[in-house]
Image (cartoon, coloured by chain):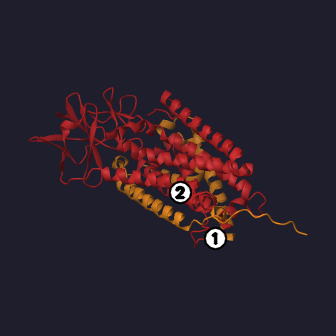
Chain colours: A orange, B red
C-alpha cells in the first residue's frame, strides 16, 4: 500500500508540473506552430496532453529543427506489425488463462439446491 | 487540413458519424441499466453504472480495433474508419465514468487515498485467480487518456509524426490490458460464464482480424527498381500498394490514362493513401480526407502538405517503380498506362 501511495504522490507532482508547462507554453504556441497563430479556441483541448506529456513536449521544443524530415513519411510499419502480433498473442494467452482458472460458482453445481437456515435461538 | 487550427473541423459526415455513435452509446447504456434493474440481481447504482459504462467502453474499443483490419480486408468498411478518433475520445470518456463509479463504490469509505487503495489493495500478482486487475485497468485508462489527449492535429506538429505515430501504438497494449482486466476480473466473479465468453469472443475477433490483415500485406521485392504487379488491373482512380525493400510502402495510381507513383503514407497521420481513391483529381486519404495531386504529391492551395513521389518506368511489358522516393512535392511525368 505504501508503494501505491508513493505512485499516487508522484503522479500528483507530475500533473502539477504539467500544469506549469501548459501555462508557460500554450500562450506562446504560435511561435512553434504556424497553424496556431491567431487560433485560441483549440488551446484548452491541449491541457490534458500537457498534464500527461510535458517532459516529451519540452524535449521536442528544445530540439526543434533537428529531426530528419524524411522520417515524417516513413511510418513505423514493422513496429506496428510487431505490436499487433504481440497484442494478438497476449489476447490468446489471456483468454486461455481466464477460461482455465474460472471456478464453477456454487449456483451452477447440480446439488446446490437452496437450503433454508434456521433462525438462531 | 486547416490553415489555422480549430477545436474540431466539423463536416456533415462527422456530425452524422458522431450522432449515430452517441445515440448507440446512449441506447446501450439505457437498455443495459434498464434490463439489469428489471431482471438482474439487485446491485447498487454505482455498481450498475460501472458495469454499464465499463462494458460499453470495452465493446466500443473492440469495434474501434476491428475497424482498421476490416477496412484493409474489405473496402466497404472504410466509412467506419473515417472519424475513428472521435470514437476513441468517446471510449476514453466512457472508461473514465466506469473508473469513477468503481472507485466511488469500492473505496468510498477508505481511510487511505482511493487511488492508492485501488492500486495497492490486492498484491496477489503470483496467481491468475484473483489477479489484481485494477492496475491493468489503470494502465489502459492512462493509455486511452494519452491517445484522446493527443488526438488533435496540433499534436502531430508538436510531437512530430514519427513520435506521434509510435505513441498511438499504445492502443495495442491498452486493449490487451483491458481484455485481461475484464476476463481475469469481472468475468471471474459472475455466476454466469456469458460475460467471460463475450469478452473472449471480442478479444479473439480483434486478434484474428489483425493476423488476417498482416497476412494479406504484400511481400517486398529487392533492388533499386521493383516491379508493380498487374498494373493493368488497377482501376481508374484507384491504386495498388507496393511493398518496398526496407519496410516502406508506395502507391501506384491510375488517373486519366497514366500511372503515377506516390508514397503510401499520408503526411497527416500516415494513413494508407493507396487504400483511398482519387476525388476531383486528387488522391484522397481514406482516414481523414487529406488530398494530394497525383502529379506532384502536393495538396491543392491553400493547403501546404506534401508527400514524396516515385518515378515509374517501363521494362518491356513490365512497369517498375523506383524504390528511393523523390523529395516531397516533386513533380513526375507519370507513365502512359
**Which residue is identified by label 2?**
B179
Q: CA distance from mark 1 to mark 2?
A: 19 Å
Which residue corresponds to the image point at 44% horizontal and 40% vertical from the top-left? B81
Dot 1 alpha-carbon crowd within 10 angstroms: few under 14, some 14 to 19, many 20 or more: few
Which residue corresponds to the image point at 62% horizontal and 71% vertical from the top-left? B124
Give the secondary structure at mark 1.
loop
Name the quadrant containing residue B26. Answer: top right
**Which residue is identified by label 1?**
B123
Name the quadrant containing residue B294. Answer: top left
Residue B76 relative to residue B19: left or right: left
Q: Residue furthest right?
A: A121
Q: Residue furthest left?
A: B316
Residue B175 relative to residue B110: left or right: left
Q: Quadrant of the C terminus of chain A?
A: bottom right
Q: Chain of mark 1?
A: B
Which residue corresponds to the image point at 76% horizontal and 64% vertical from the top-left? A115
Give the answer, above or below, for where B188 lies relative to B156.
below
In this view of the protein, can residue B328 be seen by the observer? Answer: yes
Residue A51 relative to residue B115: left or right: left
Query: Comparing marks 1 and 2, which lies closer to the viewer?
Result: 2
Dot 2 alpha-carbon crowd within 10 angstroms: few under 14, some 14 to 19, many 20 or more: many
Q: Chain of mark 2?
A: B
Answer yes or no: do the residues labelled 1 and 2 have beta carbons within 8 Å? Answer: no
Residue B324: % across, % down: 23, 48
Residue B23: % across, % down: 59, 35
Q: Quadrant of the N terminus of chain A?
A: bottom right
Residue B112: mark in rendering: none
- Looking at the rendered structure, the number of numbered marks drawn on it comes to 2
Give the secondary structure at mark 2.
helix
Residue A103: % across, % down: 60, 66
Mark 1 or 2 closer to N-term?
1
Q: Residue furthest bottom?
A: B126
Amino acid at each position: 500500500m505504501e508503494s501505491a501511495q508513493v505512485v499516487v504522490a508522484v503522479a500528483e507532482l507530475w500533473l502539477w508540473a504539467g500544469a506549469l508547462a501548459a501555462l508557460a507554453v500554450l500562450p506562446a504556441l504560435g511561435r512553434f506552430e504556424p497553424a496556431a497563430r491567431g487560433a485560441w479556441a483549440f488551446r484548452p483541448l491541449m491541457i490534458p496532453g500537457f498534464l500527461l506529456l510535458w517532459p516529451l513536449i519540452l524535449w521536442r521544443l528544445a530540439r526543434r529543427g533537428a529531426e530528419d524530415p524524411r522520417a515524417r513519411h516513413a511510418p513505423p510499419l514493422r513496429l506496428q506489425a510487431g505490436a499487433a502480433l504481440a497484442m494478438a498473442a497476449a489476447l490468446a494467452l489471456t483468454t486461455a488463462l481466464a477460461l482455465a482458472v474460472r471456478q464453477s460458482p456454487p449456483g451452477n453445481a447440480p446439488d446446490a439446491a437452496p437450503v433454508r437456515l434456521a433462525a438462531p435461538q | 487540413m486547416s490553415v489555422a487550427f480549430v477545436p474540431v473541423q466539423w463536416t456533415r459526415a462527422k456530425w452524422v458519424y458522431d450522432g449515430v455513435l452517441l445515440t448507440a452509446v446512449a441506447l446501450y447504456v439505457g437498455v443495459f441499466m434498464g434490463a439489469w434493474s428489471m431482471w438482474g440481481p439487485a446491485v447498487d447504482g454505482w455498481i450498475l453504472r460501472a458495469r454499464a459504462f465499463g462494458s460499453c467502453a470495452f465493446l466500443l474499443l473492440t469495434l474501434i480495433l476491428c475497424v482498421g483490419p476490416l477496412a484493409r480486408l474489405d473496402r466497404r468498411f472504410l466509412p467506419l474508419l473515417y472519424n475513428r478518433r472521435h470514437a476513441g475520445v468517446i471510449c476514453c470518456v466512457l472508461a473514465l465514468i466506469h473508473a469513477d463509479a468503481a472507485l466511488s463504490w469500492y473505496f468510498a469509505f477508505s481511510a487511505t487515498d482511493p487511488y492508492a487503495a485501488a492500486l495497492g489493495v490486492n498484491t496477489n500478482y503470483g496467481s491468475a485467480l484473483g489477479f489484481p486487475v485494477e492496475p491493468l485497468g489503470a494502465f489502459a485508462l492512462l493509455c486511452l487518456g494519452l491517445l484522446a489527449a493527443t488526438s488533435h492535429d496540433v499534436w502531430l506538429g508538436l510531437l512530430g509524426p514519427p513520435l506521434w505515430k509510435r505513441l498511438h501504438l499504445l492502443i495495442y497494449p491498452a486493449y490487451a490490458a483491458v481484455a485481461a482486466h475484464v476476463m481475469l476480473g469481472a468475468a471471474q466473479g459472475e455466476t454466469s460464464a456469458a460475460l467471460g465468453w463475450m469478452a473472449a469472443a471480442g478479444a479473439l475477433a480483434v486478434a484474428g482480424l489483425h493476423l488476417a490483415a498482416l497476412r494479406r500485406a504484400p511481400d517486398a521485392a529487392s533492388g533499386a527498381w521493383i516491379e508493380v504487379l498487374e498494373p493493368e488491373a488497377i482501376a481508374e482512380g484507384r491504386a495498388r500498394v507496393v511493398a518496398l525493400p526496407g519496410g516502406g510502402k508506395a502507391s501506384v495510381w491510375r488517373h486519366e490514362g497514366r500511372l503515377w507513383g506516390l508514397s503510401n503514407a499520408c503526411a497527416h497521420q500516415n494513413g494508407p493513401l493507396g487504400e483511398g481513391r482519387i476525388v476531383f483529381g486528387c488522391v484522397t486519404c481514406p482516414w481523414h480526407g487529406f488530398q494530394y495531386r497525383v502529379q506532384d504529391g502536393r495538396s491543392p492551395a491553400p493547403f501546404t502538405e506534401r508527400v514524396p513521389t516515385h518515378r515509374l518506368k517501363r521494362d518491356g511489358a513490365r512497369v517498375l517503380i523506383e524504390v528511393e522516393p523523390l523529395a516531397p512535392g516533386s513533380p513526375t511525368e507519370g507513365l502512359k498506362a
